[in-house]
């Protein structure tokens, strides 16, 4: 089968599409024929060894010193069941499924073996592009806003990076729950963010985060350019600062009204996101879609920092 392989850390040019052995579904696993997989900021970060401040050494020890041990990246994927391993009873050949397959990844390939406990059925009417696209950003937004931020009606929410994969989901989820949303993005994406539910959209080039005068119950930073002091200054008395892209120092100092760390991707949350997509209450925003052969271009687009929503490859 064809797979996008990363043998050493570096720019998009280190990603090679090559023939590799097709995986087998072992006990408890399902072999998925991948129809779509997201190329996320996390994938690009691993490929480039571009880790948040303080995480370089522990990340290399965990992921690989000179290149990722899991050479085929791609956590968020959607496809069709090709085969099931022993003891798998909840899925059958032909089922449309999707998964957040961390830490094994492997979605940037024609086939991937996934632990059946990570799989979620794709509802009728939801495309594989949308299923793969909603998982990373949607799960991250849900984790920080709902699980950690206890989002509720009437709250004021600031989303920094409102036009990205996490941000586009966060704006919609916050609005769904009755919050008043302010989005921070570039002027080019103002209309999109407003359409998704932001009552106010701030152009960060005109008004930097350090010059904002508003106060918010929840501040979600999806970009990683908001320090603790500046973030806390934006909070109401009951406010919570949510750092979805935090340095090691921020993680270690996160306490009280600051939350930082990895986002959980619970199956029940993924199923809820997919149901909302099926019902039309949650839009999945796509930037560009690439073939697997053009995955270097997909990584370049993510590296540009200008993508809007999700970048997807179709193996």
Image: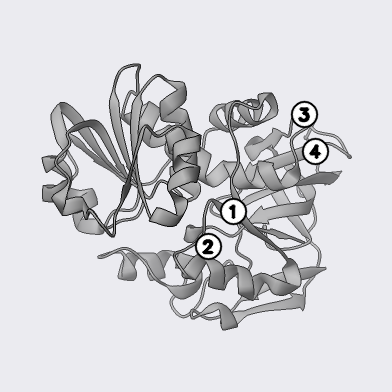
> 180 or 258, which is in the foreground?
180
> 22 or 293, which is in the foreground?
293
Q: Measure how far apart labels 4 and 2 are at the Cα level.
A: 23 Å
Q: Residue at x 76, y 49 (%)?
A: 26
Kindly identify which residue carries mark 4. 96
Q: Quadrant of residue 193?
A: top left
> 159 or 259, which is in the foreground?
159
Mark 3 crowd level (few <14, some 14–19, many ≥20, 10 Å Cα): few
Kindly identify which residue carries mark 2. 43
Above-or-below relation of 140 to 225: above
Is label 2 in a helix, a strand or a loop?
A: helix
* Callouts 1 and 3 close, C-beta under 8 Å: no
Kindly identify which residue carries mark 1. 75
Kindly identify which residue carries mark 3. 90
Quadrant (top left/top right/bottom left/bottom right) for the N terminus = bottom right
Who comes first in sequence, dot 2 or dot 1? 2
Is label 1 in a helix, a strand or a loop?
A: loop
Left/right placement of residue 263 relative to residue 122 reads: left
Q: Residue at x 60, y 41 (%)?
A: 284
List x then y, in percent, for residue 100: 59, 45
* Callouts 2 and 3 close, C-beta under 8 Å: no
List x then y, in percent, for residue 283: 60, 36
Who comes first in sequence, dot 3 or dot 4? 3
Left/right placement of residue 22 relative to residue 77 reads: right
Is label 4 in a helix, a strand or a loop?
A: strand
Q: Which mark is residue 65?
A: none
Q: Measure how far apart labels 2 and 1 are at the Cα level.
A: 8 Å
* Callouts 2 and 1 close, C-beta under 8 Å: yes
* Callouts 3 and 4 close, C-beta under 8 Å: no
């Amino acid at each position: 089968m064809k797979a996008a392989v990363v043998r050493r850390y570096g720019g998009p040019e280190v990603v090679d599409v090559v023939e590799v052995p097709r995986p087998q579904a072992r006990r408890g696993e399902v072999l998925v024929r991948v129809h779509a997989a997201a190329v996320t900021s996390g994938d690009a970060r691993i490929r480039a060894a571009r880790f948040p401040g303080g995480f370089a050494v522990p990340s290399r020890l965990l992921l690989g010193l000179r290149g990722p041990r899991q050479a085929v990246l791609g956590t968020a994927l959607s496809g069709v069941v090709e085969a099931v391993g022993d003891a798998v009873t909840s899925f059958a050949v032909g089922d449309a499924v999707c998964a957040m397959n961390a830490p094994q990844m492997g979605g940037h390939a024609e086939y991937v073996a996934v632990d059946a406990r990570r799989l979620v059925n794709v509802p009728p009417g939801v495309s594989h592009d949308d299923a793969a696209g909603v998982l990373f950003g949607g799960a991250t937004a849900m984790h920080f806003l709902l699980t950690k931020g206890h989002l509720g009606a009437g709250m004021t929410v600031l989303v920094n990076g409102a036009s990205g994969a996490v941000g586009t989901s966060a704006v919609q989820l916050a609005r769904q729950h009755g919050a008043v949303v302010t989005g921070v993005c570039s002027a080019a994406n103002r209309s999109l963010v407003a359409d998704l539910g932001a009552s106010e959209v701030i152009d960060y080039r005109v008004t930097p985060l350090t010059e904002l005068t508003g106060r918010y119950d929840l501040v979600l930073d999806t970009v990683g350019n908001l320090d603790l002091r500046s973030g806390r200054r934006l909070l109401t008395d009951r406010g919570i600062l949510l750092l979805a892209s935090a340095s090691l120092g921020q993680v270690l100092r996160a306490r009280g009204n600051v939350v930082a760390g990895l986002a959980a991707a619970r199956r029940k949350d993924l199923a809820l996101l997919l149901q909302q997509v099926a019902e039309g209450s949650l839009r999945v925003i796509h930037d560009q879609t690439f073939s697997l052969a053009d995955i270097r271009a997909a990584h370049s687009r993510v590296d540009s920092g200008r993508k809007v929503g999700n970048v997807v490859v179709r193996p």
